[in-house]
Amino acid sequence: MIELIDAGKTYTSGTIEFEALKGINLAIHEGEYVAIMGPSGSGKSTIMNILGCLDTLTRGQYRLGGTDVEELDEIELASVRNQQIGFVFQGFNLLSSLPAWRNVELPLVYGHVPREERKKRASRALERVGLGDRLDNKPGEMSGGQQQRVAVARALVGEPTMILADEPTGNLDSVSTRDVLSLFDELNNLGRTIVLITHELEVAQRARRIVWVKDGAIVRDEVNAA
Ligand code: ADP
Ligand code: ADP
């Protein structure tokens, strides 16, 4: 279970303060597929950074699987990020000089998994996203949709508690968008928790629940009827 309790975030630069999150309450249970939807500037990336333990709250609480994230130091945060969260970004964030399987094994390198086991698990993750025949291809030799599937494999390989995807289809054409969203459907059907951040209603409608954010607050939170 992931829980934000009266969560607030104020950015400060010099004497200027900006309240980007205003008392957010949000609970996401294991196995849910939630879209966080809102216009540009509404606070989606800030929520993503908080949920992903990439940034900390200025008020309230973030509880991740029973852990109070605010209590953790930098090293513990890095470990939570690595073990519990699989990230998928709009820009794929792959290392261009490394073949697909080496990109996918990276979270396991940080997790100190032995080399042979890493290769095995990376191969399995790539098979799961339909790229079992592309293990040795570098990102530049693949389409955008394939690169994003490599990124999904990397997000999966450590068996994280949740997959956190920030505009994962923002750089994809409609065919690749469909592929990647189908992959999320499959992963969710297998019980994986997915939090999908998007400003596109069509993408959000693939989730089972849509949380609408506006001006740093949740304005609607509903089961997706579509
Ligand atoms: P979204 O992802 O929905 O576009 P963001 O979370 O990126 O929204 O931003 C929410 C608001 O907070 C915006 O007005 C943005 O300009 C502001 N903001 C985001 N990050 C910072 C920062 N580091 N310093 C100051 N303001 C920020
Ligand atoms: P996205 O398209 O993912 O919402 P943004 O362009 O809003 O990304 O933000 C990119 C990065 O810049 C984020 O890490 C965000 O925190 C930071 N940022 C956004 N707005 C501001 C701002 N007004 N001042 C400083 N940093 C900002």
Image (cartoon, rainbow, N blue to C red):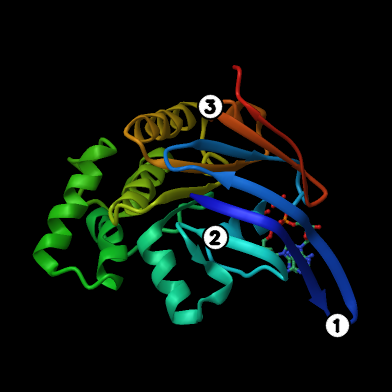
| Mark nearer the viewer, 2 or 3 | 2
Q: Is residue 126 left or right of residue 63?
A: left
Q: Residue furthest left?
A: 116
Q: Is residue 115 left or right of residue 200?
A: left
Q: What residue is shown with label 2?
A: 63
Q: Is residue 136 visible?
A: no
Within 10 Å of disc 3 (Cα), the crowding (few <14, some 14-19, many 20+) is some
Q: Is residue 82 left or right of residue 159?
A: right
Disc 1 marks a residue whose amino acid type is Gly
- Please give the name of the residue rendered at 59% of the width and 26% of the height, measured from the top-left corner: 205
- N-terminal-most mark, 3 or 1: 1
Relative image position of residue 200 (x, y in whole percent)? 65, 33
Question: What's the CA distance linking mark 3 and mark 1?
Answer: 41 Å
Within 10 Å of disc 1 (Cα), the crowding (few <14, some 14-19, many 20+) is few
- Please give the name of the residue rendered at 78% of the width and 70% of the height, measured from the top-left corner: 11
Q: Nearer the viewer, residue 120 or 102?
A: 120
Question: What's the CA distance linking mark 2 and mark 3?
Answer: 26 Å
Disc 3 marks a residue whose amino acid type is Arg
Quadrant containing ligand 2 reads bottom right
Q: What residue is shown with label 1?
A: 14
Q: Residue furthest top?
A: 226
* Rendered image: mark on residue 206: 3
